Image: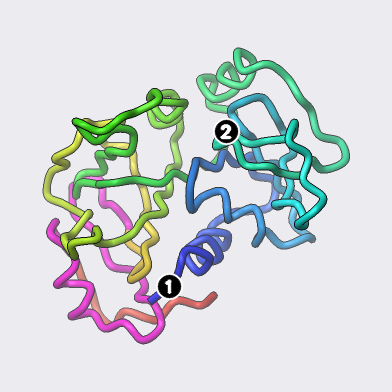
Amino acid sequence: MLDKEGIAKRIAREIKDGYYVNLGIGIPTLVANYIPNEMDVVLQSENGLLGMGPFPIAGEEDPDTINAGKQTITILPGSAIFDSAMSFGMIRAKKVNLTILGAMEVSENGDIANWKIPGKMVKGMGGAMDLVASAENIIVAMQHVNKEGESKLLPKCTLPLTGIHCVKKIVTELAVLDVLPEGGFKLLERAPGISVEEIKKATAGKLIIEGEVPEMVL
C-alpha cells in the first residue's frame, strides 16, 4: 500500500498544465513536491498567495512564509501575495481549477466530512467550507480506513459535513476511485501489491468494479 508521499505522488498526476490548484492541509500539501518542473502550474494558498513552491530545504525555512496549515513553504519567482479577502474572492469566483483536500470521511454520493470530530477541540472550520461550496473539481487525499481498521468510505458520513455532493475523485493508500454522479465509488486503480478483494473489505460504501483493475503508475 502507499504511504502519504505515495498518495501525493499519484494525485500530482491529476494536475494539468495551466491549472490553478488549491492544496488543503495534510497530505495535499505534499503534492507540491511532485509537480513536474516543465509544467506551468500555480498553487494557491488561501491565506493569500499565488505561486507556492515546494517545501524548503532544512535550514532554509522562513517562519514568515507559510501555507494555510502554518507549514513553512517556498515562494516561486513571479508570485503574488495578498490578503485573505482577495484569496477567498478567487475561490468563490471559481478561479481555482482543482482543489485537493484531506478528509476524515467521504460518502458514496460525494459528501465530505473533514473539519470536526464532535467532542474534540477544533480551532475552526478553516477555508474548507468555501472550497467545497465553490470548487467544481475536488480530489480527496485520505486514508482508506481509520486506526481501528474501519472504513472511511461510507454509505453516509457520520461526522459533521463540510460539503455535499462535491467530491469527484479519491486517492487512498489502497486505491484510486471516482465518485459517480448517481452514487457509488468506482474503482479505477489499485495500489501496487493490493488486491481488489482487499479494497472491497476496506470499503463500506457501494463499490463498483468493472473489468480488470490496473495497478497505479507512480
Q: Is residue 113 visible?
A: yes
Q: Which residue is mark 1?
A: 2
Q: Is residue 163 visible?
A: no
Residue at image coords 36%, 47%: 168
Query: Residue at the top extreme?
Result: 85
Colour mode of the rendering: rainbow
Q: Which residue is mark 2?
A: 68
Residue at image coords 72%, 41%: 52
Q: Who is closer to the viewer here, 114 or 211? A: 114
**Segment colored magenta:** 178-207
- Image quadrant occupied by the N terminus: bottom left
Residue at image coords 44%, 36%: 136
- In the image: residue 95, left or right of residue 129: right
- In the image: residue 185, left or right of residue 74: left
Residue 211: image x %, image y %?
25, 80
Residue type, numbered disc 2: Ala
Residue type, numbered disc 1: Leu
Residue 33: image x %, image y %?
66, 58
Residue 38: image x %, image y %?
79, 60
Q: With respect to residue 78, does 27 lie above or below?
A: below
